[in-house]
Image (tube, rainbow, N blue to C red):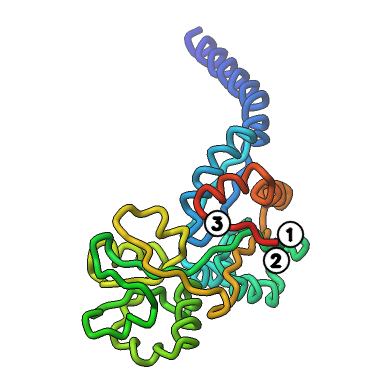
Amino acid sequence: MLNSIVAAAASLLILISWNLFQKVSPATAQQRTSLTVSAAISLSKALQELKTVYQQINPKVIITYNFGASGALAQQIQQGAPVDVFFSAATKQMDALQQANLLINETRRHLLTSSLVLITPKNGLALSSFKQLTAPRIKKIAIGEPKTVPVGQYAQEMLTKIGIWQQIKPKLVLGNNVRQVLTFVESGNANAGIVYRTDAKTSPKVKVRAMAPETLHSPIVYPLAVIKSSRNPAAAKAFVQFLAGDRAKIVFKKYGFGVAR
């Protein structure tokens, strides 16, 4: 008798569990779409704000960011990292992925622009031009690693064009990304640094001393695109469309970015 009751109870429990699975699990699976977005770290504050906005509009989409130097992020994608959207701080890295046939080409957009600036600690040396970086009182200059960090690439181009690159090379402190360059200057571990205007704007601990003319370096353009291997291409395309829209542009402008034409 007891065995019969236990067996009946077990059968009832299995039936209830199966019904719950049928009603809840498929719906839950359909409700959630995950997107991984690899983006230049200089975009982090703006994109975090936009993530909140987007997920209020589309609560079924879960966005995970992977922030870093554009060169390193591009290498990860080339090596097969599961990424849905790539948002680079330079066209060089995006071009490499396109040449490797890793993008959904029609989704590529040149979305934002920025400027290159010279910064010092807030109460640091009162510099007024990049050429003053050759002065003996300047011991350490922070820039991004030119091979992998676009802001470092732009800095090298500009310093070469004004004829001081070789002279200041012994003073260089190389950062793995633009935020590390900013930190070097904030902490006083570098007398000066070269970053994007957008990053300088986020820190009360540094002061902008000069802005590089656009003619001295390649155009600073932020392209984005959907990766061909995306597991959720429709959702990825929708997110890219949102980032290119008017609502997102307001947020990007708030953080100091220009809108590419």
| Amino acid type, callout 3 | Phe
Q: Position of residue 20 (x, y in %)?
A: 61, 22
Q: Is residue 135 depicted above or below 124 in this figure? A: below
What residue is shown with label 3? 257
Task: Using the numbered discs, state the Cα–Cα distance from disc 1 to disc 3 in whole angstroms.
Answer: 21 Å
If you read the primary sequence from the N terminus, does the residue marked by circle 1 or circle 3 appear first? 1
91 left or right of 152? right
Q: Nearer the viewer, mark 1 or mark 3?
A: 3
What is the distance, in whole Å, between disc 2 and disc 3 at their CAs?
24 Å
Alpha-carbon neighbours of circle 2 within 10 Å: few (<14), some, or many (≥20)?
many
The local secondary structure at tag 1 comes to helix
- Coordinates of residue 217 in the picture (x, y in percent): 54, 79
Contact flag, marks 2 and 1 (Cβ < 8 Å): yes
Q: Amino acid at mark 2?
A: Leu
Q: Which of the marked residues, 2 or 3, is nearer the chain's N terminus? A: 2
Dot 2 corresponds to which residue? 103
Q: On screen, 196 above or below 213?
A: above
Q: Which residue is mark 1?
A: 107
Q: Is residue 132 or residue 58 the one in the foreground?
A: 132
Classify mark 3: helix, strand or loop: loop
